[in-house]
Image: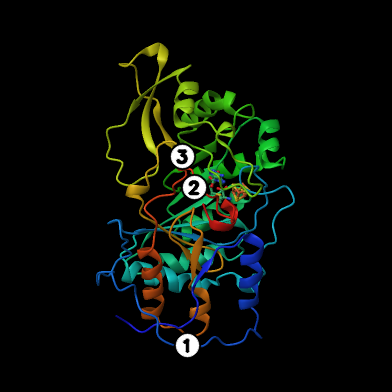
Amino acid sequence: MSVGLGIPVVKPASGAGAALADSSARGLAEAPPKPRGAVMLPSDRPDEAGLIDRFGRSGTDLRISLTDRCNLRCTYCMPAEGLPFLAPPSLMSIDEITRFARIAVTEFGVRQVRFTGGEPLLRKDLVEIIRAVAALEPRPEISMTTNAIGLSSRAEALAEAGLDRINVSLDSIEPETFAKITRRPFLSRVLAGIDAVGAAGLVSTKINAVLMPGINDDQAVELLEWALAGGHQLRFIEQMPLDADHVWNRDSMITADGIRERLSVRYLLSPDEAPRDGAPAELFQVRERSAGADGPMLGLVGIIASVSEPFCSDCRRTRLTAEGAVRSCLFSHTETDLLGPLRDGADDRELADLWRGAMWAKPSGHNMNSAGFEQPDRPMSAIGG
Ligand code: SAM
Ligand code: SF4
């Protein structure tokens, strides 16, 4: 057991506003010093190096949110008026992000780092952040989830800095539908960003899409046709109860079955044989229905069925919010502050133990399908999807 900090590091994640107000105080120079003392790893945790939990899972896939701000207002994620965003001093700096990433890579064996947000492209220092993380030994694979606005002018610099892969979120290629979902008329900027990814030589673009009944569910085939033509792997994500407005309900989502049904109007889907290996998306080979099962394969489509077919038992993710708190699960109601202790002088060993303790307490699953499920206060944009 190691010595750590005696501060109340596990706090309820009590709503974007409250959490943000609390942590914005932490970034200010006049914030009072916090007392230091001893905190132990949970006594029932075996003395293992990785980010293990009680259910035999290991956190090897790190998602780092770089900001809670965004230039879109997707209805399933952000309210129209935005949120009380974090003050800049509360965000992790390049050095702080790199230090956490180094701990993850060297202490926990993390091999994949994904930057997300909010919108990560809003960070002016994104290229420097990627360059610093790419310099770690061993070098992790670096990816980013983005809405692609502004990517056209930065894709090359990001690739040169070490970004390996990009996922772009795009729910419709119809300008009106896009504007309705995102509450912004920026489709052409997103498409320009996607084009730039190929030109920059990044390994792949995956496209993430959320289908909503009566809004874009009739465009599933059109979106897949567009993605196949451009050589992008499209993944449909079931809408989860992580909207800021808390209006999600089962009638406002299209399940994996519903997605397959809509695609089957034109396409034949057959399960891909490659092992899933902890990936959230179940992959299907796509063929024209008219060509039959022996027809040429046009590409792959993924379905991320977090709600109707949860994959929690194989979850390998550990998340850091933009203000440096560990969330062991998207649906956690508590989080563990790491940035406060770092700024108070904690050493790597202390930070690693806090992180290990947080992940040891990871719940077995999101429990979304049980009667007692409660939506977390933080919306997706303030967690880091
Ligand atoms: N702004 C970037 C983007 O949109 O790609 C990164 C952050 S966004 C929160 C990450 C992913 O979460 C996006 O693919 C988005 O579609 C997805 N997302 C947001 N809210 C969601 C929800 N309620 N259910 C399912 N997926 C959601
Ligand atoms: Fe912004 Fe991404 Fe949320 Fe849309 S899904 S509002 S692009 S953070």
Q: Residue 49: x percent and y percent? A: 27, 70
Left or right placement of residue 208 versus residue 82 in this view: left
Q: Does label 1 or label 3 sit earlier along the sequence? A: 1
Vertical side of 41 occupied by 344: above or below: below
Residue toward you, 304 or 121: 304
Question: Does dot 2 land on a helix, a strand or a loop?
Answer: loop
Give the residue at mark 2: 372
Mark 1 neighbour class, 10 Å CA radius: few under 14, some 14 to 19, many 20 or more: some
Q: In the rendered image, which quarter is residue 103 located in? A: bottom left
Residue 232 visible, this angle: no
Q: For numbered disc 3, what is the local secondary structure?
A: loop
Please tell me whether mark 3 or mark 2 is closer to you in this view.
2
Indicate which disc, 2 or 1, sits on the residue closer to the N terminus: 1
Could you tell me the amino acid type at mark 1? Arg
Identify which amino acid the numbered label 3 is placed on.
Val
Location of mark 1 (residue): 36
Q: CA distance from mark 2 to mark 1?
A: 37 Å
Residue lying at the far right of the rendered structure = 81
Question: Is disc 1 in contact with disc 3, using a CB cutoff of under 8 Å?
Answer: no
